[in-house]
Amino acid sequence: MSVCMRRLITSTRGFLWSDVETRALLDIWGEADVQSALDGNFRNSHVYRDVAGRLGELGFERTPEQCRIRIKGLKRQYYQAREGLRKNGQARKICRYYDEMDRILRARPAPASSGDPAASCGALPDLHGVHLLQPDPTCAEDCSRELREEDFEEIEEEEEQAGSGGPESPQDNFTEDSGEGSSCYTEHPIKVEHGSGFAIPLPPNDVLERPFSLRPTRPAKDMENIFQLVRNVIPPMTSKKHKGQDGKIGIIGGCKEYTGAPYFAAITALKVGADLSQVFCTKDAATVIKSYSPELIVHPVLDHPNAVSEVDKWLPRLHTLVIGPGMGREDAILDNAKGIIEKAKSKGLPIVIDADGLWLIAQQPSIIQGYQRAVLTPNFMEFSRLYEAMLSEPVETSDQHGSVLRLSQAMGNITIIQKGERDLISDGDKVLVCSHEGSSRRCGGQGDLLAGSLGVLVHWALLAGPEKINAQNPFLVAAFGACSLTRQCNHQAFQKYGRSMTTSDMISEVGTAFNKLFET
Ligand SMILES: NC(=O)C1=CN([C@@H]2O[C@H](COP(=O)(O)OP(=O)(O)OC[C@H]3O[C@@H](n4cnc5c(N)ncnc54)[C@H](OP(=O)(O)O)[C@@H]3O)[C@@H](O)[C@H]2O)[C@@H](O)CC1
Ligand SMILES: Nc1ncnc2c1ncn2[C@@H]1O[C@H](COP(=O)(O)OP(=O)(O)OP(=O)(O)O)[C@@H](O)[C@H]1O
């Protein structure tokens, strides 16, 4: 490595990378056009110029060299974790961004001579939330990663360190994000790059991603402070309000088999801050749901012969409808749900559709197509069903952004949240990614919590008006808020209960999670 190069690298150290900033960098670095530009190029400074530019669009000011060095450090951690396991069956070092790095590096095309050695390494279950690779004797040394300029420098640098006989410098320990602790930005001030050492709060954990690589996009600055936009829509607590003003949410769902799902959604709506939460369920389910909580108003009407008109009576007194949790898939109930959706649409009521509501939509998409006051919240299966119904082909799993964007467009620009390891949110124009830290615990009901909180946030975002949200799509703002909140509840509850965590534990965290994210 040249002296000049070494000096440049040294000068780019000394600044903390926050969790959100690192995730934003990884999202950009992982984009297909960046990866293919890096592939096979020994000189990559022009690529990192572009990476830094894209990061800048998201509000993170970094030089190309800082981006390159950060990526290099992350790759080192990733390969060390992987190598540690390969050699000793143990990770020498936990790499916080292992999953992200793994996803990106595994997706890289295999070197022509060796096939894809990385792909031949099977995934092991989590180790402290980190996916590690199974040792595989057929794997070539270090899974034969491709060599790039940054790799060469990494090797040289490691040799230098080895030569000095010492561990990473104290400064390195300081500059490298240890990866421990919460990603909540209020807890992680970062230092300004060339400043006087004062701390500024981190930008929010939101990333606006290009739906398609190489495609010109709208300015990312538009949505750069989406966390702040969520905060802006939260109604003030004053003594001047009457009951109902902060939200009256209706949940359509609950049948003999599923009483938990509507309860989770309804109680979450209350805990987020709605004043009233009403469940419209079948007769069988009503007493059961009522017994879970005296806070909920429960109507045993969903299997009533006049179900649609029974619910319709209440619609003028509701702010948002959440349709689907625990609704079941009986034809008669689905017919009633369809009728209720028609009534709600005619009144312009915002609608969140989840679970069995999405089953109905996959059968008859026209029920909701083009109604832009709706948000659909599919999990992986539900997304696949909808996608195939609308686009007559299987989901392109290697292009999640494109898939969610295309589905939203096909549905007439309805907002869609594709739930998963990262929640992808699109209104057919933008794709937002919420990768706020949650946990590896996947107990049932988390989607119901999301749906209930979304019902409230949608109402608040609409109520707040365009000025409070910089004229952005209120459904996107609400969706991002609900995803972040769900993940924060998951994170907090998991810290307390680990593997035994249930959705009820997450619901107990709604208050503190909400305060932490939006009110501190
Ligand atoms: N306590 C309660 O009352 C609760 C009630 N609930 C209510 O249950 C009803 C049905 O909802 P649902 O989610 O089980 O139905 P659906 O989406 O068809 O999945 C069916 C199958 O698809 C698969 N699968 C799912 N996700 C996947 C993934 N990411 N990746 C890969 N595969 C995935 C998986 O298949 P498996 O692994 O079992 O083979 C799954 O079993 C609905 O009313 C809902 O509200 C829940 O809210 C929970 C709490
Ligand atoms: N692989 C994952 N890693 C991290 N978080 C996840 C993952 N999958 C889901 N989540 C979180 O759980 C939330 C709910 O997603 P999930 O796929 O469990 O929905 P669902 O199947 O509809 O839930 P429900 O059990 O209520 O029907 C997501 O919004 C996300 O916050």
Image (spheres, helix red, strand yellow):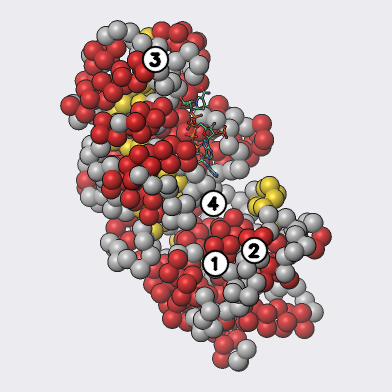
- In the image, residue 255 sits, relative to residue 217, either above or below, namely above
Residue displayed at 62% across by 82% down = 153
Q: Of the residues tagged 4 and 3, which is closer to the observer?
A: 3
| Residue most extreme to the left | 346
Going by the image, does 369 lie left or right of 42? left
Q: Earlier in the sequence, mark 3 or mark 1?
A: 1
Rendering quarter of residue 8: bottom right
The amino acid type, in three-letter code, at marker 4 is Ser
Foreground of the two, 192 or 68: 68
Residue 108 badge: 1
Q: Earlier in the sequence, mark 4 or mark 3?
A: 4
- Mark earlier in primary sequence (4, 2): 2
Is the residue marked by circle 4 packed among few (<14), some (14-19), or many (20+) residues within 10 Å?
some
Q: Position of residue 387 (x, y in %)?
A: 38, 43
* Vertical side of 96 occupied by 151: above or below: below
**Residue 439 on image: x %, y %:** 59, 43
Residue 187 rendering spot, x and y as whole percentages: 53, 52
Q: Is residue 30 left or right of residue 74?
A: left
Q: Earlier in the sequence, mark 3 or mark 2?
A: 2
Tag in front: 4 or 2 = 2
Q: Which element is circle 4 on?
A: loop
The residue singled out by tag 4 in the image is 183
- Which of labels 1 and 4 is toward the front? 1
Amino acid type assigned to the residue bearing label 2 in the image = Ala
Q: Which disc number belongs to residue 281?
A: 3
Q: Mark 4 and mark 3: span between their CA atoms? A: 38 Å
